[in-house]
Image (cartoon, rainbow, N blue to C red):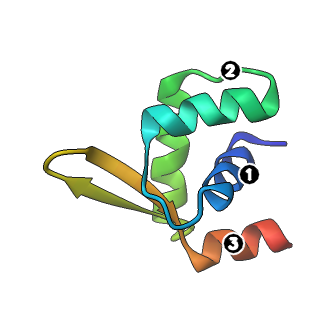
Amino acid sequence: MNLERAILTVLLDLDGHLTTTGAIHSHVGLSTGSQPMLSEVSLCLQSLERKGQVKGANHEDYGHRWLITDAGKLRLAE
């Protein structure tokens, strides 16, 4: 499984919950058995956002968090 699909899978499991990059990084490591670098996860999230498969939101108290979109769910369904 590639890193983008692993991230989308994690966000799908957390559907409806905005999740920080750090938490996604940890969940990807737990679900895949290999720990990517935090910078790799961050770059993949930015790429997924450009593709419209995740949406990032800034919050004054919680920082930048992520949510899967319908396009991301569709990619996983393929």
Which residue lies under the disc numbered 2? Answer: 35
Give the amino acid at mark 2. Answer: Gln
Q: Which residue shows up at 64% across the image and 69% down it?
A: 72
State whether residue 75 is above or below residue 66: below
Which residue lies under the disc numbered 3? Answer: 73
Of the pair 26 and 44, the residue shown nearer to us = 26
Mark 3, secondary structure of its residue: helix
Give the amino acid at mark 1. Answer: Arg
Q: Earlier in the sequence, mark 3 or mark 2?
A: 2
CA gap between label 3 and label 2 equals 23 Å
Which residue lies under the disc numbered 1? Answer: 5
Q: Earlier in the sequence, mark 2 or mark 1?
A: 1
Which quarter of the figure is the C terminus placed in? bottom right
Q: Name which quarter of the figure residue 75 lies in.
A: bottom right
Of the pair 16 and 3, the residue shown nearer to us = 16
Mark 1, secondary structure of its residue: helix
Q: Earlier in the sequence, mark 3 or mark 1?
A: 1
Q: Are marks 3 and 2 in contact (CB under 8 Å)?
A: no
Q: Are marks 3 and 1 in contact (CB under 8 Å)?
A: no
Of the pair 44 and 29, the residue shown nearer to us = 29
Q: Residues within 10 Å of mark 3 (few under 14, many from 20)?
A: some
Residue 54 coordinates in the image, percent (x, y): 51, 63
